[in-house]
Image (cartoon, rainbow, N blue to C red):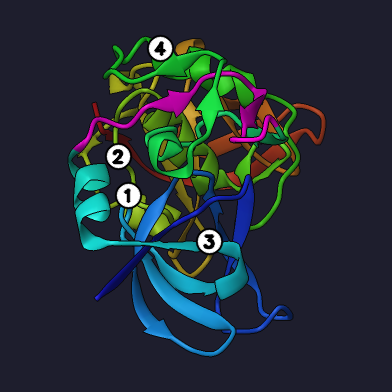
Amino acid sequence: MQYGICPLSIVPLRFAPSNESEMMSQLLYGEHFKILEERAKWSKIRVAFDGFEAWVQNKQIQKIDENIYINLDTQQPELSADLIEFIVGENDELMPVSIGVTLNVNTYLKNRYDGTVVKSILPKENIVKTALFYQNSPHLWGGKSPLGIDCSGFTQMVYKLNGYKLKRNAAEQAKQGEALSFIEESEAGDLAFFDDNEGVINHVGIMMQDNYIIHVDEKVRIDRIDHSGIFNAELRRHTHKLRVIKKII
């Protein structure tokens, strides 16, 4: 088995080994992974944090030995808490990184980060505060940063910054936690899941106080939520059909 880390700000993870293939997710700086299959220009990897599997260009990753992988896997993650900051390289060159990148690799890459760091499990009350950092970030299928993010990338990153693990896709996240029977039982920080006409879960958002939800619909936005689903006041209609609310924390 071979192992690697992401040494760049953001790297696309694709469905197939081609630049023309759909971007399914992203690696952020510092994330580590196992290499499942290696080809001349591409490798299929499994991300350590959430088990997500996809293809990445070999030129955009850096291999590490097994001992470093194990050390990264057992350490408490140190994450950047600034919306946008810089990683400073060995020769003082700058690389911009977004909130939520993993800083534990700095020792191995001989980099440093002088911004704000979070490395502890935070109370559930902090979930919504973190979510508001991403408000108005544009929607990007497969994205995980404030410069472009999708619904499940948004919930995953918000939870990650507070010390909790979520799977990558909404349908997988919906399998985590405890289901609530009524919307009135929910608390700020719980996750609400929504499905399509075939019953497939395809959307997720974070519950707020007083029947509001923060989620990604063209951008990270706040809308009303009721027993039917998300109500967009600008469109004057429901846009997403509620399936279940889950208590993860």
Which is more N-terminal, label 2 or label 3? 2
Q: Identify the residue at image location x=24%, y=76%.
A: 1
Where does the image place residue 145, in percent across and percent down from the top left? 63, 39
**Label 4 with label 1: CB-CB less than 8 Å:** no
Residue type at mark 1 is: Phe
- The part of the chain drawn in magenta is 75-92
From the viewer's perspective, is residue 98 above or below residue 209? Answer: below
Q: Which of marks 1 and 2 is nearer the N terminus?
A: 1
- Give the alpha-carbon distance from disc 4 to disc 3, as whole Å: 30 Å
User: Sequence order check: which comes first, mark 4 or mark 1?
Assistant: 1
> Which residue in the structure is indicated by mark 2?
165
Q: Is residue 8 visible?
A: yes
- Residue type marked 4: Asn
Distance between the alpha carbons at the discs numbered 1 and 2: 7 Å
- Give the overall secondary structure of the magenta segment: loop
Badge 2 element: loop
Quarter of the rendering containing residue 105: top left
- Do callouts 1 and 2 mark residues in contact (Cβ within 8 Å)? yes
Q: Residue at x 52, y 19 (%)?
A: 81
Identity of the residue drawn at 49% across and 89% down: 39
- Residue 123, x across and y down, in percent: 29, 12
Between the C-alphas of marks 3 and 1, the distance is 28 Å
Residue under label 3, please give it: 196
| Residue 211 seen | no
Measured Cα–Cα span from mark 4 to mark 1: 21 Å
Q: Residue furthest bottom?
A: 40
Residue count near mark 2 (Cα–Cα under 10 Å), binned few <14, some 14–19, many ≥20: some
Q: Residue at x 61, y 31 (%)?
A: 87
Which residue position holds label 1? 49
